[in-house]
Amino acid sequence: MKIVVIGGTGLIGAKAVKKLKQLGHETIAAAPSTGVNTITGEGLTEALTGTDVVVDIANSPSFDDQAAMDFFQTAGRKLITAEVAAGVKHHVALSVVGTERLQDSGYFRAKLAQEILIKKSPIPFTLIRATQFFEFVRAIAQFSTTGDTVNLPPVLFQPIAAEDVAIAIAHAALAEPLNDTLEIAGPDTFMLDEPIRKVLKYDNAIQKVNIDPKAPYFGVKAKRETLVPDIGAHLGSITFDEWLNQTPSPSS
């Protein structure tokens, strides 16, 4: 089976490409750095020739409202057009748990628009919505810091390891299309401040953590269950503590 992974050189993409190759499938890591650009269309037709499955993990390089919308709309349309021409049988895409509940954010409006394009496409699809990755917990702390204080809302949080996301993507790529959405999350549910506190302690950071009902999540107001999946989500096996204890601290 030939599989093309759009965004195949990134955090999740590189892991998914490695797993699919290990399983014996011809797998192409498609990205501008490898000569495939879904915005300009460069290399897309050639990459998709003879392809059975396309996995789209590419993310907008900008989180600005219009830039994100332009990216997902342009890339999505070019990719679907190329898939139809190549006779692709299955489109797998990675999205975010809670996308429809975060529509005050231009980025998440763009992600929802991407999902709608996929669902309207003639290509059979599997849409995977993941919770936030363990690997981005430090970025959440940094984004939420003012002075020496991390301000966080009191919301539930069920992050997942990038490794488990890649496993779920590989499984989906090799299975029949769901023509539906699959949610994936980590094995444990926390309040948002818990993993943030663990990371700060592990890193010997000086920031304090403040819980504030008015504090936003990446600039968006979030309710208690905004960031967690519905009942029935597929759960990864790697715990946050296991991941953290195997991850070098930035200060080490």
Image (cartoon, rainbow, N blue to C red):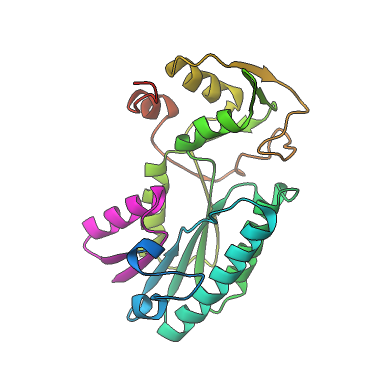
Is 157 drawn above or below residue 249 in the view shown?
below
Q: Name the residue located 48 percent from the left edge and 22 percent from the top edge.
A: 199
Is 13 part of what is drawn in magenta?
yes
Q: Residue furthest right?
A: 214
Residue 193, percent from left and from top: 60, 23
Residue 148, percent from left and from top: 61, 17
Q: Name the residue located 67 percent from the left edge and 26 percent from the top edge.
A: 152
Residue 24, percent from left and from top: 21, 62
Q: Residue furthest front?
A: 147
- Magenta-highlighted residues: 1-28
The quarter of the picture where the N terminus appears is bottom left
Is 221 part of what is drawn in magenta?
no
Of residues 99 and 147, the one drawn nearer to the viewer in this rendering: 147
Is 180 drawn above or below residue 228 in the view shown?
below
Q: Is residue 140 left or right of residue 30?
A: right
Q: Is residue 158 left or right of residue 32?
A: right
Count the marks: how many? 0
The quarter of the picture where the C terminus appears is top left
Q: Residue 31: in sight, yes or no?
A: no
Of residues 93 and 218, the one drawn nearer to the viewer in this rendering: 218
Is 88 drawn above or below residue 99 in the view shown?
below
Of residues 172 and 202, the one drawn nearer to the viewer in this rendering: 202
Q: Name the residue located 47 percent from the left edge and 76 percent from the top edge.
A: 41
Q: Name the residue located 38 percent from the left edge and 54 percent from the top edge.
A: 13
Residue 22, percent from left and from top: 22, 56
Q: Residue 42: in sight, yes or no?
A: yes
